[in-house]
Image (cartoon, rainbow, N blue to C red):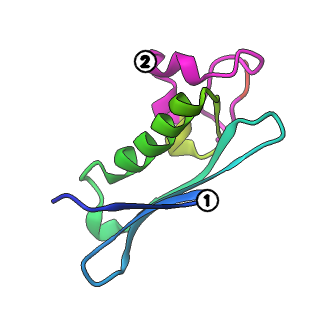
Amino acid sequence: MKYDIHHQPNRFWMEDHQHQLIGEIEYHLDQAKRYVVTHTFVNPSYRGQGLANQLLDQIIALARKEKKFIYPICSFAVKVLQDSQYRDLWDPKEGEPTGGACTWIKR
């Protein structure tokens, strides 16, 4: 099933037909003008449908449109953004995103 994705500053989210939250992803711009992805949530009843990826895709598209980097601290975003297809979103000053403590650190 397809759900509409809503947007307001610092947040994308999905709701069901009763306006109950299905999933959300939160972010903000830091001082370096990077999109910092801080939190991803999908209601357990809706997991396994790729909704978190759809939400992250919104920030990816926004960052590419605005030519900004993404700095993920949410473990889900760290995991996804490790893929080389997102290399254009990595801040070269930070190195490659790595797992671990849910932060982007060069090891």
Instruction: Give residue 101's quadrant in the image.
Output: top right
Reply above or below: 18 against 45: below
**Is 96 a magenta residue?**
yes
Q: Is residue 29 left or right of residue 3?
A: right
Instruction: Give the camera-side residue of 44 and 50.
Output: 50
Quarter of the figure that contains the C terminus: top right
Question: Residue extending furthest left?
Answer: 1
| Image x and y of residue 87, in percent | 53, 17
In the image, which residues are magenta? 79-104
Residue at x-position 71% and y-position 15%: 92
Residue at x-position 69% and y-position 31%: 104
Reply above or below: 61 against 55: above
**Tag on residue 9?**
1
Q: Sequence order check: which comes first, mark 1 or mark 2? A: 1
Question: Residue extending furthest bottom?
Answer: 18
Secondary structure, mark 1, is: loop
Q: How many C-alpha atoms fall within 10 Å of the one at disc 2: few (<14), some, or many (≥20)?
A: few
Secondary structure, mark 2, is: helix
Mark 2 belongs to which amino acid?
A: Gln
Q: Is residue 58 left or right of residue 35?
A: left
| Image x and y of residue 13, in percent | 44, 63
| Image x and y of residue 3, in percent | 26, 62
Quarter of the figure that contains the N terminus: bottom left
| Image x and y of residue 11, in percent | 55, 59
Q: Is residue 90 left or right of residue 86?
A: right
Which residue is tagged 2? 85
